[in-house]
Image (cartoon, grey):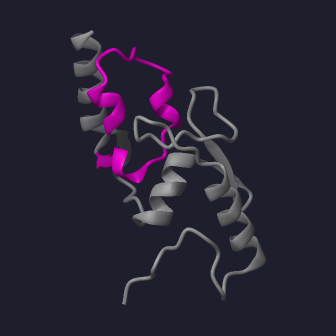
Amino acid sequence: MATQRTSRPTRGQTDREAGYLTRLLGRIGRAPSGCWPWLGTLTWGGYGQIGRHGQNVTAHRAVWEHFVGPIPEDLTLGHRCHDEDLTCPPGPCEHRRCVNPTHLYLQTRSEQMTARLAHAAAM
Protein backbone atom coordinates (compact mmCIF):
# COMPACT_ATOMS: atom_id res chain seq x y z
CA MET A 1 0.00 0.00 0.00
CA ALA A 2 1.38 3.41 -1.00
CA THR A 3 2.12 5.97 1.68
CA GLN A 4 -0.38 8.78 1.57
CA ARG A 5 1.30 12.17 1.42
CA THR A 6 -0.48 14.92 3.24
CA SER A 7 -0.14 18.66 3.43
CA ARG A 8 0.38 18.56 7.20
CA PRO A 9 2.29 16.48 9.72
CA THR A 10 0.65 13.19 10.69
CA ARG A 11 0.67 11.00 13.78
CA GLY A 12 3.70 8.79 13.94
CA GLN A 13 6.11 11.35 12.51
CA THR A 14 9.03 12.39 14.64
CA ASP A 15 9.17 15.96 15.86
CA ARG A 16 12.07 16.51 13.46
CA GLU A 17 10.08 15.23 10.46
CA ALA A 18 6.99 17.20 11.49
CA GLY A 19 9.07 20.38 11.92
CA TYR A 20 10.67 19.90 8.51
CA LEU A 21 7.30 19.33 6.85
CA THR A 22 5.79 22.37 8.55
CA ARG A 23 8.72 24.53 7.37
CA LEU A 24 8.55 23.08 3.84
CA LEU A 25 4.83 23.63 3.36
CA GLY A 26 4.84 27.00 5.15
CA ARG A 27 7.24 28.50 2.62
CA ILE A 28 5.19 27.81 -0.50
CA GLY A 29 3.34 30.73 -2.06
CA ARG A 30 0.69 30.76 -4.77
CA ALA A 31 0.88 32.90 -7.92
CA PRO A 32 -1.84 33.68 -10.49
CA SER A 33 0.27 31.85 -13.10
CA GLY A 34 -0.18 28.59 -11.19
CA CYS A 35 3.43 28.63 -10.01
CA TRP A 36 4.12 27.96 -6.35
CA PRO A 37 6.97 30.38 -5.66
CA TRP A 38 9.34 29.41 -2.86
CA LEU A 39 9.20 32.06 -0.13
CA GLY A 40 12.20 30.84 1.83
CA THR A 41 15.94 31.01 1.26
CA LEU A 42 17.27 30.99 -2.30
CA THR A 43 20.53 29.59 -3.64
CA TRP A 44 22.94 31.83 -5.55
CA GLY A 45 21.38 30.38 -8.73
CA GLY A 46 17.85 31.41 -7.74
CA TYR A 47 16.47 28.02 -6.63
CA GLY A 48 14.59 27.60 -3.36
CA GLN A 49 16.57 25.89 -0.61
CA ILE A 50 15.66 24.21 2.68
CA GLY A 51 17.59 22.34 5.34
CA ARG A 52 16.67 18.67 5.72
CA HIS A 53 18.37 16.36 8.20
CA GLY A 54 21.42 18.63 8.44
CA GLN A 55 21.86 19.15 4.67
CA ASN A 56 20.58 21.81 2.28
CA VAL A 57 18.37 20.57 -0.56
CA THR A 58 16.63 22.46 -3.34
CA ALA A 59 13.02 23.18 -2.49
CA HIS A 60 11.59 21.91 -5.79
CA ARG A 61 13.25 18.53 -5.19
CA ALA A 62 11.98 18.44 -1.59
CA VAL A 63 8.41 19.24 -2.66
CA TRP A 64 8.55 16.68 -5.50
CA GLU A 65 9.76 14.01 -3.10
CA HIS A 66 7.00 14.86 -0.61
CA PHE A 67 4.08 14.91 -3.06
CA VAL A 68 5.27 12.59 -5.87
CA GLY A 69 8.05 10.36 -4.57
CA PRO A 70 11.77 9.71 -4.89
CA ILE A 71 13.81 11.11 -7.77
CA PRO A 72 15.95 8.42 -9.42
CA GLU A 73 19.69 9.15 -9.15
CA ASP A 74 20.13 9.36 -12.93
CA LEU A 75 17.33 11.94 -13.37
CA THR A 76 16.83 15.58 -12.54
CA LEU A 77 13.79 17.88 -12.49
CA GLY A 78 12.81 20.31 -15.23
CA HIS A 79 10.40 23.24 -14.92
CA ARG A 80 7.58 23.22 -17.50
CA CYS A 81 6.74 26.81 -16.58
CA HIS A 82 10.25 27.86 -17.66
CA ASP A 83 10.29 25.74 -20.81
CA GLU A 84 6.97 27.20 -21.99
CA ASP A 85 7.86 30.85 -21.25
CA LEU A 86 9.95 31.94 -24.23
CA THR A 87 10.28 35.45 -22.77
CA CYS A 88 12.26 34.03 -19.87
CA PRO A 89 16.01 34.50 -20.26
CA PRO A 90 18.44 31.62 -19.83
CA GLY A 91 20.06 31.40 -16.41
CA PRO A 92 18.46 32.52 -13.15
CA CYS A 93 14.79 33.40 -13.59
CA GLU A 94 11.59 33.52 -11.56
CA HIS A 95 10.67 29.95 -12.57
CA ARG A 96 13.55 28.49 -10.58
CA ARG A 97 11.58 29.42 -7.45
CA CYS A 98 8.54 27.39 -8.61
CA VAL A 99 7.95 24.23 -6.56
CA ASN A 100 4.53 23.25 -7.98
CA PRO A 101 4.87 19.50 -8.69
CA THR A 102 2.56 19.82 -11.72
CA HIS A 103 5.06 22.29 -13.22
CA LEU A 104 7.97 19.87 -12.70
CA TYR A 105 8.96 16.78 -14.67
CA LEU A 106 11.68 14.14 -14.59
CA GLN A 107 14.38 14.32 -17.26
CA THR A 108 17.88 13.05 -17.93
CA ARG A 109 20.81 15.46 -17.75
CA SER A 110 21.15 15.14 -21.53
CA GLU A 111 17.49 16.14 -21.99
CA GLN A 112 18.04 19.04 -19.60
CA MET A 113 20.95 20.36 -21.70
CA THR A 114 18.98 19.92 -24.94
CA ALA A 115 16.04 21.86 -23.44
CA ARG A 116 18.39 24.64 -22.26
CA LEU A 117 19.93 25.01 -25.71
CA ALA A 118 16.52 24.97 -27.42
CA HIS A 119 15.19 27.61 -25.02
CA ALA A 120 18.23 29.85 -25.59
CA ALA A 121 17.95 29.44 -29.38
CA ALA A 122 14.25 30.42 -29.33
CA MET A 123 15.06 33.79 -27.75
Q: Going by the picture, which residue comes out furthest to the right? A: 15
Q: Is residue 116 left or right of residue 26?
A: left
Q: Is residue 113 visible?
A: no
16 inside magenta stretch? no
- Quarter holding residue 88: top left
**Residue 17: x and y, percent?**
69, 72
The residue lying at 24 percent from left, 37 percent from top is: 111
The x and y percentages for residue 91 are 45, 19
Q: Is residue 48 left or right of residue 52?
A: left
Please give the name of the residue rendered at 62% of the width and 58% of the height, measured from the top-left corner: 25
Considering only vertical position in the picture, is 114 above or below 51? above
Is residue 93 found inside the magenta-colored segment of the image? yes
Q: How many marks?
A: 0
Q: Residue at position x 38%, y 45% from top?
A: 77
**What range is drawn magenta here?**
80-107
Give me the residue at 65% from left, 65% from top: 21
Quarter holding the N terminus is bottom left
Foreground pick, 40 / 90:
40
The image position of residue 3, as x and y in percent, is 45, 82
Q: Is residue 107 above or below residue 90?
A: below
39 and 42: which is toward the camera:
39
User: Split into 4 quadrants, where in the image is the C terminus?
Assistant: top left
- Give the residue at the far front of this rendering: 32
Which of these two is toward me, 111 or 36?
36
Image coords of residue 59 (percent x, y): 57, 47
- Depicted 16 relative to depicted 86: above or below: below
Left or right of residue 106, residue 34 in this image: right
- Residue 74 seen in the current view: yes
